[in-house]
Amino acid sequence: MLDIMKYFTLKEVKKSLVISIWFMILTFPIMVIKVNTIENTVVWRWTSLIGMGIGSFLMATLWRYLIDRKNMKSDISDKKTLQMKVMDWANENPKYKKIALVAVILFIAAFPFFTSMYQTSIMTTALMYVVLGLGLNIVVGLGGLLHLGYAAFYAVGAYTYALLNYHFGLSFWICLPIGAGLSTIMGILLAIPVLRLRGDYLAIVTLGFGEVIRIVLENWNEFSFGPSGVANIPRPGFFGMSMKLQTATIYIYFIMIAMVIFTIFVVRRLENSRIGRAWIAMREDEIASESMGIDITKSKITTFALGAFWAGMVGVIFAAKTTFINPASFTLWESVMILCVVVIGGMGSIVGVVVGALILILLPEYLRAFSEYRMLLFGAILVLMMVFRPGGIISNIRKKYKFEPTEKSSNIEVEGVK
Amino acid sequence: MDLQYFFELFVGGLTKGSIYALIALGYTMVYGIIKLINFAHGEIYMIGAFTALILASALSFTGMNPVLIFLIATILAIFFSASYGVTMEKIAYKPLRGSQRLSALISAIGMSMFLQNYVLLAQTSDFLPFPNLIPEFKFLEPYKSLISSSGLIILVTTAIVMILLTYLIKFTKTGKAMRATSQDAKMAQLLGINISKVITMTFIIGSSTAALGGVLISTHVGQLNFYIGFLTGIKAFVAAVLGGIGSIPGAVLGSFVLAWTESFGTGYISSDYEDVFAFLFLIIILIFRPSGILGRPENKKV
């Protein structure tokens, strides 16, 4: 164990002091002086300088402690993490696992009936991010392709429903597959030109693609009604019945629940299928996997297509839920937000993405007091997460083949730890 | 064709391209050395501009000579931006050295969000007018519609910076170390080059030029807010990729090509789609020449 007192010796304190002075100088113009060039006033905020000094002093000490701890940890890699302990416990006690599962299902099913409509609505949003995260997880987590234009596919789905409904009066249920299909086609269209690009180039081209879609939607007034967007999109119907707002909210909540279950089911199956294995191999090493007979072209196109598929579907539901869409909902920050869900949750891990989406969407909603600092905290969390826990909250544990010498040594037990 | 209009667009593109070039240099140098897209670079540019605005307005109450104020504010802005760049590297990128590239990239995105909101919360979300410090030059009177005095300053400063930088990279020891590191970091280390120092130096230079670009464009446009870094940063990055990321002449060339594309695109086709031209151009270039105009194709290795 690390001795915490070590960080309060004179030498260490001096180090922290130097860092805190550095930060006081660094943040001086922006934190202390506040100018208003319109009214020509200058406010000097000396208190924030003191706050900055004390804050950075403490942070510097904490930072060094955490870095040391991280380095210590990598030395003892065999140590079981909390996450592994929980999983072992669940595997050993299948009875409790079942009880916990039933409790979760009951809670989810009963949620809209004992909370307010507002809560249900927020939960629906969180569930939408679960599906979006799982979709992006196919591209980023499994395929290893950094995609920064994911919101564009989301927009395609939303606009498909909004415009088809506006012009032809098509209903939600007809538009759901159309939106998903169109979005998939867009995914393929994007995938074909970027096949040759890797890594950072891919990131910037997908980013550009996302921005192009948004700007076109913003400016092509005849097609998408420009920045004012499309309003009065009908909520999904239930065999032609019209519903009150409250019932409709609950109804969408359950549609989303069904979507999430469907998505998890499909993504799990995909992950362990031939295609999924090919994606993972491609993520690890493109050339090596190609030499093992994996069709990289096909793999890349399928990751983009399937990733886009979910975004299109959620887009349709989003349009139906909010009943109003405009291009401002599909900015780059939306893409980054979905990326955050995947990264903070844990790339490649389904449970991780679900947890990530719930935390990232629900936490800011309940911590209204911090709403101003939301993006600031997100940014800081992204950095800290990458530095201290790059695998995410629930990291994807690789499948391991465990050899356990049993009585018959030829009997090799294969254990899939997920 | 209206020649006057053409020249206006041309010079407009030239000033814009200069600013892109000043920012793109940071991207391309950092990429060349640590193979990381420094997404927060646009924020450094914004912080540079903001610091200059704050200091210049605070100083202007002392009643100093505006040109002197401008110089002091610019130098201090460069100093602060370089410090931010170095600190950022120490916090967000150094611990990630040697880990997956995706992690570093996400860390950079996080840093960008953090810095943007830090300025937003500590200052304001409104557009602030930049104090008018540069006097109108007399000799530019006949060409007034073509180029303003701040535009001229941008062009001259960029040219000087480019020459200095070329000298630094080509003929000094630091530049040699930088080139060596970008070729093969491991080998450079074996030969006794302090990689950490080289990286710090890169961040200092990149952030300084970005800050200079920020100050210059703010005086030219006359206003700024916390969000200016984002789009400009991405455009500069596009420029760096266009020219071939990792290559310094490529970044400069890419910046001018991009700026002219935008300038003529908006001038002759439609001003609504300014950003679309930039991105479409990028996508087209990358499809036909994935390593950019001057970039060397990356060797694929297992």
Image (cartoon, rainbow, N blue to C red):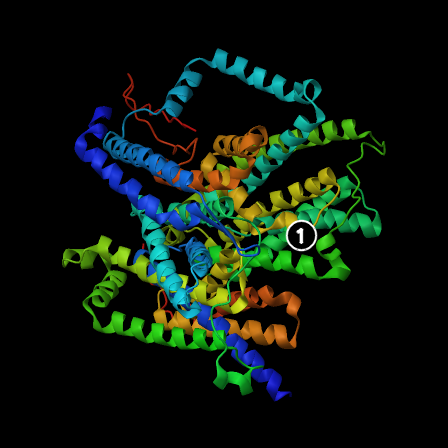
Answer with the quarter of the image where residue B37 lies.
Answer: bottom left
Q: Give the x, y percent position of residue B84.
A: 36, 52
Check disc 1: other Cα within 10 Å, few if <14, some if 14-19, many if 20+: many
Quadrant assignment for the N terminus of chain A: top left
Q: Is residue A416 left or right of residue A114?
A: left
Q: Which residue has dot 1 on it?
A: A327
Residue found 71% across the figure and 26% down from its top: A117
Of the pair A99 and B283, the residue shown nearer to us: B283
Which residue is located at x 80 percent, y 35 percent?
A237
Up the image or down, A117 lies above or below A43; here it is: above
Q: Is residue A273 visible?
A: no
Quarter assignment of residue A267: top right
Q: Quadrant of residue B2?
A: bottom right
Image x and y of residue B80, in percent: 36, 55
- For image coordinates 50% across by 48% down, the residue present is B123
State left or right for residue B185 relative to residue A159.
left
Q: Which three-letter amino acid code belongs to the residue tagged 1?
A: Pro
Considering depth in this image, is B236 or A285 the residue closer to the camera?
Answer: B236
Q: Callout 1: helix, strand or loop?
A: helix
Residue A27 position, x and y percent, is 38, 47
Q: Residue B128: image x %, image y %?
A: 55, 57
Tell which subunit mark 1 falls on.
A
